[in-house]
Amino acid sequence: MARLDHLKAEQLTPEQQRIATEIASTRTRVGGPFGIWLRMPAIADAANKLGQTLRRDGKLDKRLFELAVLLMVRDWGAQYAWTVHDAAGRAAGLSDDVIAAIRERRPPKFAKADEQLIYDVISELLKTKRVSDTTYRRAVDALGLELFIELIAVAGFYTMVAMTLNTFEVDTPDGGTPLAS
């Protein structure tokens, strides 16, 4: 059960209303971590801008973006984020087998080299809290420096998302728990 109730429109200050409207303009709802962050408008506004920069305006292929997100939120066991990004990953072109393997904490079998690269980078970062020189060079050679920076920013942003969701025990939209421990 969620630790905080969803804010109702009549509870919002004018600043919160403005930010909620901006968030809602590109999302189906103002929920998940944004429902928490909205209590601190400056954080909600900054998070929305960074999220939009990465999600909407980023140059990283959406399939690779969603792969990175799924890897991050699975590692954190963030049920809400998994629910949202499971569907987004499929829509972006990730295979059901890859998504199922990540959900089940199995190494996926990738048909595409760029997906394997993203998996390797994110998995190494999660396991060692660093990226080795070999992996760094491989990623920069394949993606270029700017996309590699964007990838690491996606990992960091979704760590913040997952930490917020888990700390405040945000329920999934349907109340389900798609991730086993």
Image (cartoon, helix red, strand yellow):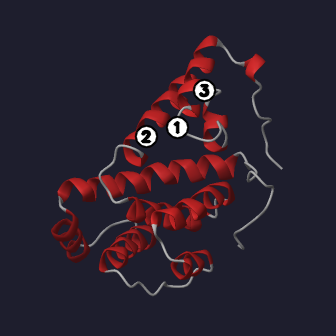
Q: How many marks?
A: 3
Does residue 147 lie above or below 108 as drawn?
Answer: above
Image quadrant for the C terminus? Answer: bottom right
Could you say where residue 162 lies in the image, as x and y percent from the top left?
A: 58, 53
Closer to the eye: label 1 or 2: 1
Residue type indicated by callout 2: Gln
Could you say where residue 91 lies in the image, as x and y percent from the top left?
A: 52, 63
Residue nearer the viewer, 148 or 159: 148
Q: Secondary structure at mark 1?
A: loop
Residue tagged 1: 26
Residue tagged 2: 52
Q: Residue at x 50, y 28 (%)?
A: 45
Residue tagged 3: 20
Residue type indicated by callout 1: Thr
68 left or right of 41? left
Q: Residue at x 35, y 43 (%)?
A: 57
Q: CA distance from mark 3 to mark 2?
A: 14 Å
Is there a contact, CB below 8 Å, between mark 1 and mark 2? yes
Residue nearer the viewer, 166 or 154: 154
Does residue 120 lie above or below 111 as drawn?
Answer: above
44 left or right of 78? left
Could you say where residue 71 lies in the image, as x and y percent from the top left?
A: 50, 68
Q: Earlier in the sequence, mark 3 or mark 2?
A: 3
